[in-house]
Amino acid sequence: MTVAYHQGGVVYAYRGDRHSQLGKTWQGTILNNPQKVVDKCTSNQGVPPEPAHGHGVTGLTMDKAKPGVYTGNCDTMFTKGYDCRWANCHLPTTISRKAYHVQMTVAIYVC
């Protein structure tokens, strides 16, 4: 399950079948047969998060805009000079005064 939080509250959560590459490659974070648990995004609602590869950062960044396209977008990255947090989700005003570029935590749970 991939869950995104803002200030401790769930913004979106998707569950799916475990990918065979989980823990081995970045592709392992792709959810097979993704199912929406909750999605409060005002942009790209219903689009499951997937890894975005090739941004030249250490670690993993996720994208919620283009399913099956693993380059060119991001929704979770914050580095010196570049901030794309919530860029493909846009937080509703009931959660934050700002739609994007604010605190974000993404967790991946494995059962």
Image: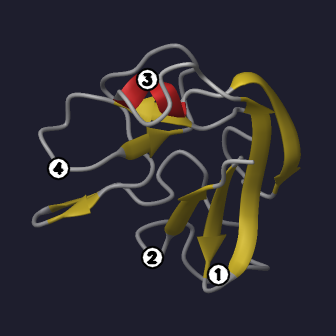
Say which residue appears at 45% left-offset and 48% top-offset. Answer: 75
Whether tag 1 and tag 2 are in contact, CB under 8 A, the answer is yes
| Distance between the alpha carbons at the discs numbered 1 and 2 | 8 Å
Point out the tag, 3 or 1, that comes first from the N-terminus.
3
Query: Which element carries disc 2, helix, strand or loop?
Result: loop
Query: Which element carries disc 3, helix, strand or loop?
Result: helix
| Distance between the alpha carbons at the discs numbered 2 and 3 | 26 Å
| Distance between the alpha carbons at the discs numbered 3 and 4 | 15 Å
Point out the tag, 4 or 1, that comes first from the N-terminus.
4
Point out the tag, 2 or 4, that comes first from the N-terminus.
4
| Distance between the alpha carbons at the discs numbered 2 and 4 | 20 Å
Query: Which element carries disc 4, helix, strand or loop?
Result: loop
The disc labelled 3 sits on which kind of residue?
Gln
Point out the tag, 1 or 2, that comes first from the N-terminus.
1
Q: Which mark is residue 102?
A: 2
| Distance between the alpha carbons at the discs numbered 3 and 1 | 31 Å
In the image, which is nearer the foreground, mark 3 or mark 1? Answer: 3
Asked whether 111 or 84 is in front, the reply is 111
Q: Which residue is mark 3?
A: 27
